[in-house]
Image (cartoon, grey):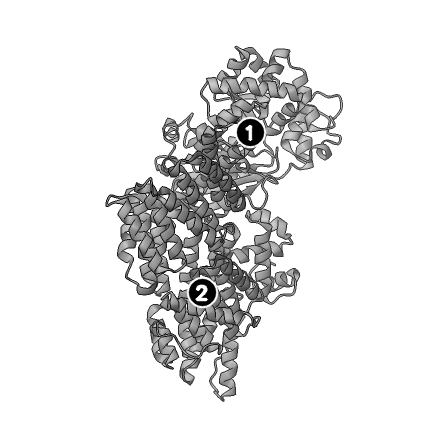
Amino acid sequence: MQLLERDDALQRLEKLLATARDGGGRAVLVRGEAGIGKTSAVRVFTDSHLEDAHVLWGGCDDLLTARPLGPIWDMALDEPSLGEALRGQDRYEVFALVLELMSRSLRPTVVVIEDIHWADEATLDMIKFLGRRIDRSHGLLVLTYRDGQVPGDRPLRVALSDIAASALERITLTPLSPAAVSELASEAGGSTDGLWELTGGNPFFLTEVLGSEHESVPGSVRDAVMGRVSRLSPASRALVDLVSVVPGRAELELVDSVLGPSEEAASEAEAAGVVVLKENALTFRHELARRSVETDLPQIRRREINLEVLRAVEDLGYDVSRAAHHARVGGDVDALVRLAPRAARRAAAMESHNEAVAHLRALEPYLDQLEPEMCADHYDLWAFEEYLGSEIGWAEEIIEIGIGIRRRLGDPEKLGNSLLIGSRIAWVRNRRALATEMANEAASVLESVGGLPLATAYSAISQLAMLAGDEKRTLWYGEKALAVAGEGPSQPRAHALNNIGTAKSIPRYPEGMEELEESYAMSADIHSSHDQIRAAVNISWGAIYHRDLATAELWAGRAHELSIDREIASFDAYVTGELALIDEMRGNWAEAEAKVCFVLDTLAELGTANIVASTLLGRLQARRGEPDAKTHLMDGWERSLQANEVQRTTPAAISLAEYVWIGGKLDESIFPQLREILAECIDRDSPWMAGELAFWLRLIGEVDQMPDIAPEPYRLSGDGDWEGAASFWKERGIPYDRAVALSHGDTDARIEALGIFDDLGALPVAARLRSELAEAGVNRVPRGPTRTTRDNPFGLTSRQLEVLRHLSEGMTNAEIADRLFVSNRTVDHHVSAILGKLGANSRSDAASMARDAGLVDR
């Protein structure tokens, strides 16, 4: 059947390949409903470039638990170097090799990954890895995606939203027109009566109906598929039944292993249009056809075939996740108990954490069949993988069971390890007391073990103290960890140096940088990416606290690159928060907002990062006079109180105090809490946090004087030296704080402050200052910026502009979420922010204002 009404899609693919050939690699998402012809269109495109491009093709399979990097295993059939990298189980080596293949300049490389709605976590991470670098390659990354398959919170949306908009093209395939359906029906010699109404213009449905040989149009596509299958010989039908229980592709050697020589049966099924032979494997022409046949099988027969396939998969040495799939579907509990732990460990090693969790959860009903030692190992891994997947509540329950088993078994080293896992989970759950208790018990248990396990426990206690702002306890346990770990490079040593350096840097920066930089270098030497990124993150935080923005930006940039390379989402969230704070201080508020929205949109399950993001977003909104400011500020405040750490509570308290100075209202019960946090900052010897909080509290009349430990600019402000404070902020490149200082000066200084507030978009403060100047009789008060003279008159972020354009097209929030691959909650937030910035009462008002301002086409 010819390909109709796809010329536009093919032409766009051709243009993208031409761009990639010139060194401007691109990613393209080909999307549409099931059966719309995504594979056919992409296949026509790649077949036309087999001579002038290198084509690698892989697909994601609808397994109960996806196999890690499944599409790359497919590509390895054509590119053996990929197979070698996969067998090494270093996914970063695999990622780098695929990128290298796409970067070759002799001829472009087209990498096709089909059905990414079924992609495993490692494959999604690879898509993110490639997407962030694609524009510097000679490659074209083609992704196919079935509409309506992915709920809003799935990681796929995160992976796609991570690709720069300039590097990602979207091609949506639509159903065929009635004219095209009639043309194809006429060519096939079939009736056109009611055909478009039945098939909806879906090419696959149309093909099945036209090939069904029914005297009349069949009642469903399933009827059409089974009509073809029913005419096969018994041998060919047995082959088709077997292939139907194998998602993706059934290798010929697998089919022969189960059924014996099957060449004639395969040829018959292929001639009937039921299956196709590709690269020594049989597949259905579409997943819908496979499912039609599979669901037609009696349940007992389906289980029997899966068990036969299971034996063949194991005998042939295929991927263990495939074997585990057939064990589950076939109901072989013994095989599942044997295979699932192996599949989980392998997925965890490839950092496909969602797939590891799926294998581990599948074993839950059968854990009583495991030996106690194996069962405890299972709980450790299960809890840790649930923690990495952000199912923190479940992780906490699981590790409690594992710790109970460890206590009965009596192995101190393994009990200590389980307790440390539990401690980390408890901290993320904002249960500091329990986290500290478990870390202390781990240290006690590991006293008899000594060495690196004990050093790890001491360093865990040190870290908890550092996070609480307890420098004395941090240094005490950090030094004990170093002594036990010894002089050689090790993970506990690098971890402890990090704690010590961070604790020193908060009150006495740049003291502590030596330990942090040593931790960074040591972590790189021992290939501990987690600790290396953590060191860079904490160097940047120390610099941010002390307003050394150049150093902060340098180290945050290093941390950002490493977190991207290693695909560590938790650090990606922290670093994005750091970069947002730097943008906010430099006056780049739109960029700061975009970053915190990214954290809230895609990484909201990471609680501590969420505190930073909510607080900063609320602070920016308060400065611009937006209605949602208090909601986000209170969210950050309440979360910080749950965390109960001075590094979390103080920024939230500072933002609330500034909110009141701007003109906001708070419950009176909050002010004593703000003063208590100030006292704690002073007690913890945290000069910058204490100074900034005291500064805002003094402006709103909650404290009378600045604390002695306050750093220079806040001390100068407290002494009435607004000029000295403004000079400090100017030197550091922090315009808003400079404007606040100038606003307390003479008339010229206040007029200068007004200009800065206007440029930043700090509307409420600017309006108040403008009114005060007018009341004082100042005749030369600037009018302020007019919206019609600004390129982006409402201060919208790039994402908000994108949402506004779709809103103006009449899309619902759900439709916008689907188009942009974000959650409905994210779009709700953006729409609310847009209405606030525009001062619009409704969506239609916002659309009208956007058209009037030239932000969208009329």
Residue 766 picture location, percent across and down: 50, 76
Residue 155 picture location, percent across and down: 52, 43
Distance from Cα at disc 2 to Cα at disc 1: 48 Å
Residue 371 picture location, percent across and down: 48, 28
Element type at mark 2: helix
| Quadrant containing the C terminus in the rendered view | bottom right
Q: Which residue is at 46% across, 85% downward?
A: 780
Element type at mark 1: helix
Q: Which residue is at 54% across, 29% downward?
A: 368
Left or right placement of residue 698 versus residue 669 in this view: left
- Furthest residue in direction bottom, as rendered: 777
* Tag 2 residue: 650
In the image, is residue 145 above or below residue 629? above
Left or right placement of residue 292 versus residue 652 in this view: right
Q: Is residue 67 visible?
A: yes
- Furthest residue in direction left, as rendered: 487
Lower position in the chain sequence, tag 2 or tag 1: 1
For this rendering, which residue is in front, 262 or 187? 262
Q: Is residue 24 visible?
A: no
Residues marked 2 and 1 touching at CB (< 8 Å): no
* Tag 1 residue: 366
